[in-house]
Image: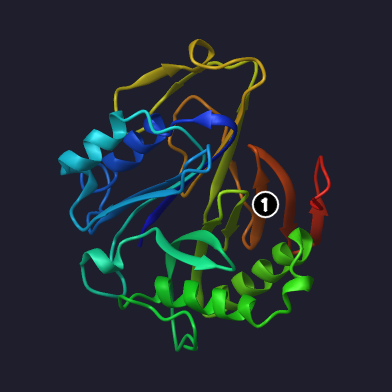
Amino acid sequence: MCELLALSANTPTDMRFSFRGLTRRGGATGEHADGWGLASFDPLGGGLSVIREESAAAFSPLAAQMAEHDLKALYSLAHIRKATQGVVTLENCHPFQRQWRGQDWLFAHNGDIKGTIPSGDPYIPVGNTDSEAAFCWILNTLNDQPAEQIGPQALFALLNRCSAHLAGQGIFNCLISNGQWLYAYGGTKLHVITRRAPFAQATLADDDVTVDFSAVTTENDVVTIVSTEPLTTNETWRALAPGESLLLVDGEIVACHTSAGAQDLDRNLDP
């Protein structure tokens, strides 16, 4: 299957350190060598940057270049692919991008969905993965809802229902963002860590690289990283419970949902 990576922060932040660790798993320390992708929302409203390649990230000059590129964002997603459904081609690389009601949406998936995923309009897959089909189904499902009923809390609830339905058909872990929030669903495996002051050093698990975050942050910075597997060896990552979902805004987890139900955290979801 694949590995997921996402960043949510309250100040424009690059994902170079985490992305470097992830790329090593794309054919060097891991078997996810069937393509990769990196996407970031411009924090100044300048649009969305999406870079995808069907080669192994660990040996890709472009991936290495991006791991050194100071691409700052409030929301970024990355993915390395191990194909389970769909051929190895650019069209099947994540993250997938669509527009929904005037907003750019990103989607990345780790898993294997069995059976038929209903198709419909207006969102139709370009490639032949279960992942893109799931994304299109989610957007078509949301599209059937009256616009006035899709507030932040209702949207979180709808994404949870869609995710639970897809997880019932197999393995489903996903990341979704529209540049204003990050949604993470861990059907089977997902980890999260929030870094805030006092910042400390972190060492990659897949490369001999250590970063002192205290030297590149301020005391007000908050950065949350979501990853399939922990990317560092000297930090405490939390594993999401099976079926747990998170909604992140500006680096903070503002809502979560588990089998016990939903809980709003720290701030109101309403605008």
Callout 1 environment at 10 Å: few (<14), some (14 to 19), or many (20+)?
many
The answer to whether residue 188 shows anywhere in this view is no
Q: Is residue 49 above or below residue 97?
A: above
Q: Does residue 21 appear left or right of residue 189 in this picture?
A: left
Residue 260 place in picture, x, y as percent: 80, 62
Here the colouring is rainbow
Image-quadrant location for residue 162? bottom right
Which one is nearer the viewer's eye here, 192 or 132?
A: 132
Residue 65 place in picture, x, y as percent: 23, 34
Label 1: element kind: strand
Q: Does residue 138 appear left or right of residue 94 in this picture?
A: right
Residue 2 place in picture, x, y as percent: 36, 58
- Tell me what residue is drawn at x 29 percent, y 44 percent: 25
Q: Does residue 21 appear left or right of residue 64 in this picture?
A: right
Mark 1 highlights which residue? 247
The answer to whether residue 162 shows anywhere in this view is yes
Residue type beneath disc 1 = Leu
